[in-house]
Image (spheres, grey):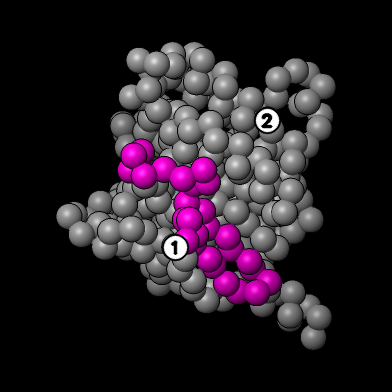
Amino acid sequence: MRILAVSDLHFQEQHFAWVAQQAPHFDLVIVAGDLLDLFAFGRTSIDTQVRDVTSFLTDIRLNCNALAVCSGNHDLWATRDLRWLHLPPSRNPQEEKLGGTFIGDGGSAIVPGTRLLVTCCPWAAESDEDTQRLATLLEHGNALRNSGTDAWLWVCHEPPHLSRTGRTTEKVEGSPLISQLVLKYQPDFVFCGHVHGAPFDGGLPFDQIVDTWCFNPGCPDRRKQLPEPPSIILDLAAGQAVWRWGSMEKRAFVESPIALAAYASAA
């Protein structure tokens, strides 16, 4: 099983187009928050951004087996209404019946053809109500996990505070709440973003908290953008994670519970 993950696309049209081109080669595509750009409203209205991003997500969903998307702070601050990230993206009713499975913000589902459970966590740094909503979502996800899966994957915009995916040379960032929840539920994988410089400046694109692998593709300064965004490819069968951006590349060996389960059943 192969996973492609990006984050913090911030309304970069060419980056959404690149993800759509890559999508057919993966079992799961992840966009870990901040699809919109709050600071671009001067040139592109928020309504236009939502409409165009929904169209971009439709292109991705129509080309892949499964698409998982969570909200980030820009998405919430820009719209204050995240329902557009809850439903399968489509431009017309016919497209709702086509393409891969969509796992939207605040939802959990099994990736078709696998035993991988994915939970997409909404941005939860604004209020106690948001925190409670996230806790309820993860409690439900944990029940699903215990009903028979090989691995549990979270998509959440903010990295865990304990992970080096939430650090740069200037400061330690990340969410203490997400760290607490990771320690409580011990998911197998957490895909995040938000801390743009982690893979470039003093942090890491992948790291472990106990047995939980955390991933952050990062986001370069807008003045240094390339045609493709930074991305992480996780190959669960090969047990390898690869972070790439342009000519830069980092690799890590990731022991996959899905691969171990497949090996055990074959034996």
**x and y percent of residue 157 in the render?**
42, 44
**x and y percent of residue 17 in the render?**
61, 37
Q: Which of 113 and 136 is in front in this view?
A: 113
**The disc labelled 1 sits on which kind of residue?**
Met
Crowdedness of circle 1 by 10 Å Cα count: few (<14), some, many (20+)? few
Q: Circles 1 and 2: CB distance less than 8 Å?
A: no
- Marks 1 and 2, the one that precedes in the sequence: 2
Q: What element carries label 1?
A: strand
Rendered position, 35 above or below 182: above
**x and y percent of residue 199 in the render?**
36, 59
Q: Kindly identify which residue carries mark 2.
A: 58
Q: Kindly identify which residue carries mark 1.
A: 248
For residue 215, side relative to residue 178 (left or right)? right
Question: Which numbered disc, 1 or 2, marks the residue closer to the eye?
Answer: 1
Q: Quadrant of the N terminus?
A: bottom right
**The disc labelled 2 sits on which kind of residue?**
Thr
Rendered position, 227 above or below 255: above
Q: Is mark 2 on a helix, strand or loop?
A: helix
Q: Can residue 143 be seen in this view?
A: no
- Judged from this view, the residue extending furthest toward the bottom is 267
Question: Which residue is at a point 20% across and 59% down the rendered structure image?
Answer: 169
The magenta stretch is 221-247
Q: Quadrant of the C terminus?
A: bottom right
Question: Which residue is at a point 44% across and 50% down the rendered structure image?
Answer: 192
Question: Which residue is at a point 73% across and 80% down the rendered structure image?
Answer: 263
**x and y percent of residue 162 in the render?**
30, 61
Q: Does the magenta stretch include residue 104?
A: no
Rendered position, 90 above or below 158: above
Rendered position, 118 above or below 149: above
Q: Is residue 241 magenta?
A: yes
For residue 183, side relative to residue 119 (left or right)? left
